[in-house]
Amino acid sequence: MNFLKENHPEILNSIDKIYESDLSKISKVIDCYCQFVNIPTKQIMGEYINYKDIQHRYKAIAVVLRIFQPEKLDNLKTKVKSSIYKELGPYLQINNDTLQKSIICACNQFDLYRDFKKEIKQIANYYLIEARFNNG
């Protein structure tokens, strides 16, 4: 990532404008996030998880939004696509109410915290690069 940033910033800029349209890949994005931060995917699944894992869940959801519906992170009033709910809730094994609250928290943190935003962009770019070079 640093190599691209230093030597080919135009690639990262072009990736920033790319987003995924195949919502069946949401589970791959969640798995990629967990691999990137070196935690098992099961750790962010289910209704009742600890605080540290909730933060990971918010970040994973923000990465999903960054890749599948980036306009949601730029405008908090934008509604999340129902198809994202249909894929994300069952994969994370949480109900729609918990998912909705998690999406709100993820979006708020993306909006408020520069480090959170930077990490989300980095992991989203990592996923997009991996997907492009490994035929995702």
Image (cartoon, helix red, strand yellow):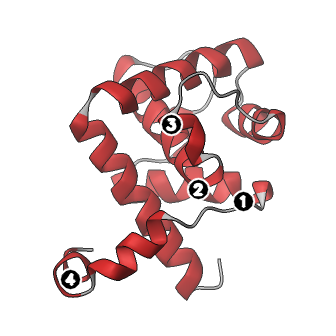
Say which quadrant the N terminus sits in.
bottom left
Give left or right: position of 128 versus 55.
Answer: right
Find out whether the residues at labels 1 and 4 contact each other: C-beta distance under 8 Å: no
The amino acid marked with disc number 3 is Leu
Q: CA distance from mark 1 to mark 3?
A: 19 Å
* Depth order, front residue of 91/20: 20
Residue at the (82%, 33%) spot, across then down: 82
Q: CA distance from mark 3 to mark 2?
A: 16 Å
Tell me the residue that label 1 is attached to. 25
The amino acid marked with disc number 1 is Lys
Query: Which tag, 3 or 4, sits closer to the chain's start?
Result: 4
Residue at the (71%, 12%) spot, across then down: 97
Tell me the residue that label 2 is attached to. 29
Tell me the residue that label 3 is attached to. 73
Q: How many marks?
A: 4
Q: Residues within 10 Å of mark 2 (few under 14, many from 20)?
A: many
